[in-house]
Amino acid sequence: MRILLVEDHPPLADSVAAALKSGGWTVDVLGDGVAADLALQSEEYALAILDIGLPRLDGFEVLARLRGRGQTLPVLLLTARGEVKDRVHGLNLGADDYLAKPFELAELEARVKALLRRSLLGGEQKQQCGALVYDLGTRRFSLAGEFLSLTAREQAVLEVLIARPGRVLSKEQLAAQVFGLDQDASPDAIEIYVHRLRKKLEGSEVAIVTFRGLGYLLEARNA
């Protein structure tokens, strides 16, 4: 899953991004509100972490524009402002959560998981497709009760597929969630990861089905 982090204080941005990347998420880091607004219009994210005190365009305005476009991705606001009126203003604009600085990285990660659980998994801790189970709390997949060993990119592709049951996803849609702004986002690379995942799912009732010209669907056969 791909997260946008917008924070203009480089040391904090670096530490937050490192913590999220170590958890397996793809993270794009931007430092001002205008760049964030443009990225949110052109890229696909599962979540945005948005500082309020940004240059050029503050976080409140970025959030207001996002919701004005009808975009529903969850937003976690970060701010040094602890006043109730600021929290209320952010929540009224459409923020999903609010975290005041300074904060512990463990709390930030817990809030990120909670927001993703609500938005992608319908509030459930686990998502299941036949014998394949994804636990958002541990960020692990198991197949027929056994831990499924995956590379970071394989994990990212499978997370996107299992979080959208019954939906056919194109290579472009998968690439948009797997690759960051600073990475080669070739949709053709998705074919490689899908091929590897199929090998690891072999012998089970779970399969990644190709719909020619459309994309891929994760399904449990004979379920």
Image (cartoon, rainbow, N blue to C red):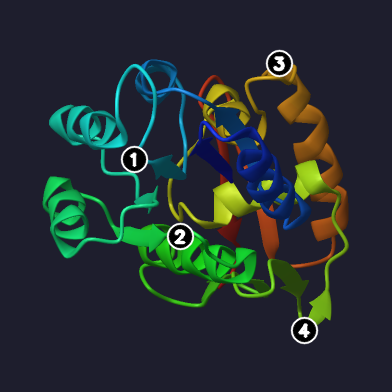
Is disc 1 surrounded by few (<14), some (14 to 19) or many (20+) residues within 10 Å? many
Q: Position of residue 190 (x, y in %)?
A: 72, 29
Q: Horizontally, is 36 left or right of 65 in the view?
A: right
In the displayed structure, would residue 38 be above or below residue 207?
above
Q: Report the disc number at residue 186.
A: 3
Residue highlighted by disc 4: 145
Identified by mark 1, the residue type is Ile
Q: Distance between the residues labelled 1 and 4?
A: 43 Å
Rendered image: mark on residue 30: none
Of discs 3 and 2, which sits in the foreground? 2
- Label 4 vs label 3, nearer the camera: 3
Q: Position of residue 199 (x, y in %)?
A: 87, 50
Give how far across and how far down residue 9 sits, in percent: 56, 35
Cβ–Cβ under 8 Å for marks 3 and 1: no
Counting other residues with Cα less than 10 Å from the Cα at mark 4, is it few (<14), some (14-19), or many (20 or more)? Answer: few
Give the CA separation, mark 3 to mark 2: 25 Å
- Dot 2 surroundings within 10 Å: few (below 14), some, or many (20 or more)? many
First-in-chain label (4 vs 3):
4
What amino acid is found at the position of numbered circle 2 in the picture?
Answer: Leu
The amino acid type of the residue labelled 3 equals Ser
Q: What residue type is labelled 4?
A: Gly
Which of discs 1 and 4 lies nearer the camera? The answer is 1
- Look at the image and tell me whether residue 31 can be seen: yes
Give the number of the mark in front: 1 or 2: 1
